[in-house]
Structure formats: structure tokens, C-alpha cells
Amino acid sequence: MSTVIEANGLGKAYRRNWALRDCTLAIPEGHVVGLVGPNGAGKTTLLGLATGQLTPTRGTISVLGAPPAASPAQLARVGFVAQETPVYARLTVADHLRLGGWLNPGWDEELARRRISQLGLDPGQRAGSLSGGQRAQLALTLAIAKRPELLVLDEPVASLDPLARREFLRGLMEAVAEHATSVVLSSHLIADLERVCDYLIVLVASQVRIAGEVSALLASHCRLSGPRRDPGTLPAGQDVIEESHTDKQSTLLIRTGEPVHDPAWTVTPVSLEELVLAYMNPANEIPARRPRLGVAS
Amino acid sequence: MIEFQLDETSGVATYLQLVQQVHQALRMGMLEPGEQLPTAQQVVAKLVINPNTVHKAYRELEREGLARARPGLGTFIVRAPAGTDPATQARFLATMTDWLRSARSAGLGPDDIEAIYRTAFRTCFAEGAA
């Protein structure tokens, strides 16, 4: 499987402080990947390294099979929308498109103009007087019109109102549908991620706690509730991610490859949000996958 | 043409929601063989979901033999799902109703009845899966 981003033992230090340390991950191509994790997990640093704006202190990273920002051709293959979606306040919308055309060899002028007119933006307006939502849409237009193979977005919608957020994601998803672009998107807004992502990575303290296709993650986790029970007595193949107990009752969030048939449990599906919270919680120890014992089936 | 909806509170995976809505529309006669399903672009623009999710739903419908992709044209319905024979459905509905009446007259409340049903359902399908 081809990867869009691959990191091995990747680290970035500022003086003696590690913003990212010993991070190893592989993000497959052809997905819209949600990158979630608590503040300080290293998401922004990772995306900065992936787009070549930062250089690693340790380890390696490759993007679309090559070092990030190694050449103008490599730069053209990756589009980036930064936090707060910065634009040039004194330049007009049309100026931004002209700049995009000068700086990007694969610039799709027709696509850029079409998006600007669909969005109802006035080409003569200065970017500094655009609303937050319009500014984000302009930044997204610039990134999409590069016609990149990979789009990287660092919390692009964090500061937008719900309507502007929905419109931004609509533009992003339309671009993915039209150009089959791979996307890596960091966000704290799990409801948004649930809508638009088909692959999820939970990053905590530079480490991948869980990664995989969203549908597979949801299918392989569930919540069990029933009479109090020691989680150690669960059958092999059922790994406890999170547990809580009262004197009479146990509630477990488990990872399992098989349906749970024990009639003592009430089994309910977990939402993506519950799953992410369980994996983000530093109090939860994530067990390594236990091999199934030799039970004849 | 079918118009998809998204229920974010259902806990059902988005691609499955699309598949189920096609099944439902076929059963109700709102969608018929020969009709085209919306393109991924159209679904994405309406629901703001990942186009891969739409592709996945359509692949599932193809796997079930209900839809077929025609390259360059789109995905089309080829047949309706084989429904259960109405007489059989009616027979089991009648048995179930009789059972519910007798449970009720034995003093069981709705919660008791639901718990019994769920346990029996799970036992029955666990046997089937084993």
C-alpha cells in the first residue's frame, strides 16, 4: 500500500523541549484522514514537518515517497491550509489567485475562478475585510487550485461558526470527489471528522494510540454493561480499553474481532467520539493485541 | 432519483445508512430497476460526507447484486431485493401478536417483554453464527 506520509522515529526539538518525539506512523493514500489528539500531542509539529516548514531534529519523514519540500516539484504535490487560514490582508481576492498562478506550476485557474464565483466572493475585495469563513474558503481555494496529490489542513475550521464550517467541509469534500485527492486533517471537532473522515489517527504524546479505517474501528469496538465482573475473566480476543465499575455493575469499552454473545452483557455500539475519548485518555492503558488462544471453532 | 438523508444520532455507519435507504426505497417502490443513483459528487454536495463513503455504499449494493456501475455514466439499479413472501410475514406477525397478548395477560410489562425478546433474539442468532 502506498503512503502519503511516513515517519520513523521522527522528532523535533526547540532548544531542549521536544515538540514531537520518536513518532512513527504510516498514513495510507486515498483517504480523508482525521488526526486527533490533545493539545501538545505534536499534531501541528507533525504537519509542519510533513509540509517541509520544519526540519526534523531526529528521525525521518517522507511525503508521497520523497523528503518534504525537497524540490519545487515536490512542493507542488502538497497543498497546505494552516491554522487560522492566513491570507494577505492587503491583497484582493483576485491578487491571491494571480499569486497562486505565479507560484504554482500546476495552477488550475478555471477551478479557482469557479470556486470564487460559487462562493460569491468579490474578486476586488481585500482579503483583510473578508469574514472568517470567507478567508478560510479563499485559503482552501488556493490549496485546491494547486491541484495537489495531498492536502494537509491543520485545524482549518476551529474558529468558524457552524454554517461556515459546514460550507468549508463541503468545498473540501467536493474537491476530494472531483480530484481523488488524499487529505490529512487535524481537528478537535469529532462530529465533523465523523462526517468527512474515513481514516482516523489518535496521537497522544507523539505516539499513535490507534489508527485505522473509521468503519473498521467502529465495527471492532463496543460497550459492554452487565453485572460486576473482573475484566481479566474476559475471553481471549476481547481487549479492555476502558472500564468503570460500581459495586454491582461493570461497564467496559472493548476491542474485539468477533461478536459478543455472552448473555450477561448488554452490548451497545460505540460512537466515534466515545472511541476517540477512550483512546485519548492517558489513564487508559491500551493493551497490545492478544493472540487468540487455540480454540477450535 | 433517491435523495439520501443522514441520521447522525443513529450510531449506524454512514455507508450502511445509504445502503439501507436504497433497500427501503426499493421496497417502497420509490426506486426502480433502471434508475440511476445520485453521483458521488451529488451526494457529497448534499450531505457533506466523504466521497469514499458513497463509493463504499455503492460497492456494497453491487455486491448484493442490486446495482451496477457503468463506467463514465454512473451507478444504476438493476433489480429489487428479494423480499419475504407476504403470506409468510403475515403468519409470523400473527404468531408474534398472539404471544405478546398471552405475555401481557400473564402480567408482563413492556420492559419484561423486550428483555425476553432481546435475549431470545441474541441466543437464536448466536446459534446461527456459531
Image: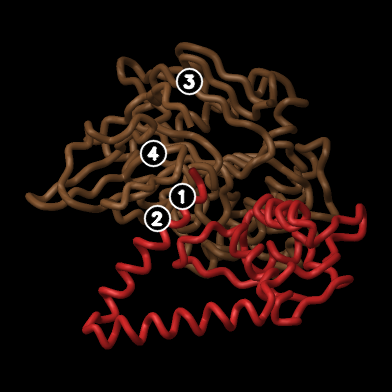
Chain colours: A brown, B red
Q: Residue B66: x and y, percent?
A: 78, 62
Q: Nearer the viewer, residue A279 or B115?
A: B115
Reading the image, the residue beneath label 2 is B123
Up/down of A18 relative to B21, above or below: above
Q: Quadrant of the N terminus of chain B?
A: bottom right
Q: Amino acid at mark 4?
A: Arg
> Circles 3 and 4: CB distance less than 8 Å?
no
Q: Residue furthest left?
A: A247
- Label of residue A287 in the image: none
**SS of the residue under disc 1:** helix
Q: Secondary structure at mark 2?
A: helix
- Amino acid bearing label 1: Glu
Tell me the CA gap for discs 1 and 4: 22 Å
Tell me which amino acid carries mark 2.
Thr
In-image side of A91 versus A273 (left or right): right
Q: What residue is pinned by disc 3?
A: A24
| Label 3 residue SS | strand
Q: Which residue is mark 1?
A: B127
Q: Are marks 1 and 3 on the same chain?
A: no
Identify the amino acid type marked 3: Thr
Location of residue A143 in the rendering, given as x and y in whole percent from the top left corner: 68, 45
Q: Is residue B80 visible to the viewer in this orientation of the structure?
A: yes
Q: Which residue is mark 4?
A: A255
* Between A250 and B41, the one nearer to me in the picture: A250
Tell me, yes or no, whether dots 1 and 2 are on the same chain.
yes
The front one of B71 and A165 is B71
